[in-house]
Image (cartoon, rainbow, N blue to C red):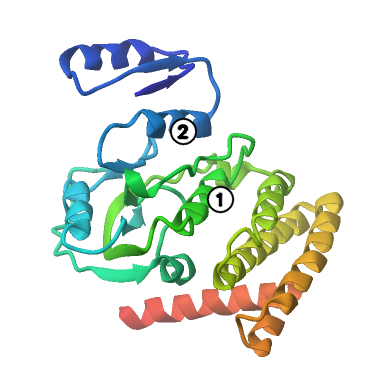
Amino acid sequence: MIDDGSTDSSPQICDEYAKVEKRICVIHQENKGVSAARNIGVRLAKGEYISFVDADDYLHPQYFEILINGLKNRDAEASCCKWTWDTCENPQLFPEVTPSYEILSAEEAFASGKIEKGPVCKIVKKAAIGKIEFDENLAFLEDSIYTKTLLLNGLIKNVVFTPSSLYYYYQRSDSASHTKPAAERMPALECSYARIGMYQEEIRNYLWIESTVKLLCSTREAAQYEKDRETISQCKIMARKLVLKIMESQTQPRSKRIVLAVLAKSALAYSILLNGKNQLRKLKHKLRR
């Protein structure tokens, strides 16, 4: 347990747990932020697996059982599941789960959209994490950068995915993803762009380009909503740089690269695509009824 400068009774509670359970190790430190706390926890962990759970979320009782069983007897280094929204009104009523598993390569997992972009909803073999750490200089979207870097770090070859919703994500209206202004997304966008070209495999670099374009589009959309001219201007500069990276890549057909370049440059094109996806999602939801 990492006490990251808590000002309530949490340090004492942690110490009490450590007295009755020898496997619990408590670290007290001044407040350094969630990334520093996570990094210390991973460095000191002695178990075979690493799993992250946010403080206000909770898990299906079979979460660890199902995900670890997914790793056993399979040539994979990470096991993931789906998450579901929940308001924590009655966390004791869990649905019965009959798990099924799908094997994805690290690249397929990265590109599929099935894997939760943050560190939650997954268990990773500690040996497969290597030297990957959360960027302590990022105050926002550091969890997304970490997870994407982890998937392509070369130590994870395959990922086991179960479509069961085993992670209950409690979304507050004042959470960081709702309250951070567009300008505070820019450090993560710059960080994501800087990682393009860091891999020997060109397909991995292209995956980073695609991911960075998505982050650019969401940042630009937020900046336009906030009428943040400075951030909009920075996004335009980033768009020009990304278009050059896109067209330089030779791993994808030219037609596909042109579509990605248009999305990077045109806020309108992105808005049309996003609206189309939302309408399709609503239609599928109606058809299921």
Q: Secondary structure at mark 2?
A: helix
Which residue is denoted by mark 1 in the rendering?
A: 145
Residue 116 is situated, as x and y percent measured from the top left of the image, at: 42, 57
Residue at 73% from the left image edge and 60% from the top image edge: 220
Residue at 82% from the left image edge and 67% from the top image edge: 240
- Residue 220 drawn above or below residue 283: above
Quadrant of image for the C terminus: bottom left
Using residue 63 as the reference point, say whether residue 38 is left or right of it. right
- Which quadrant of the view contains residue 88? top left
Using residue 281 as the reference point, say whether residue 177 is left or right of it. right
Find residue 39 and name its label: 2
Q: Secondary structure at mark 1?
A: helix
Residue 219 is situated, as x and y percent measured from the top left of the image, at: 69, 56
Q: Residue furthest front?
A: 200
Quadrant of image for the N terminus: top left
- Which quadrant of the view contains residue 176? top right
- Residue 58 drawn above or below residue 26: below
Residue at 37% from the left image edge and 63% from the top image edge: 157
Say if residue 7 shows up in the picture.
yes
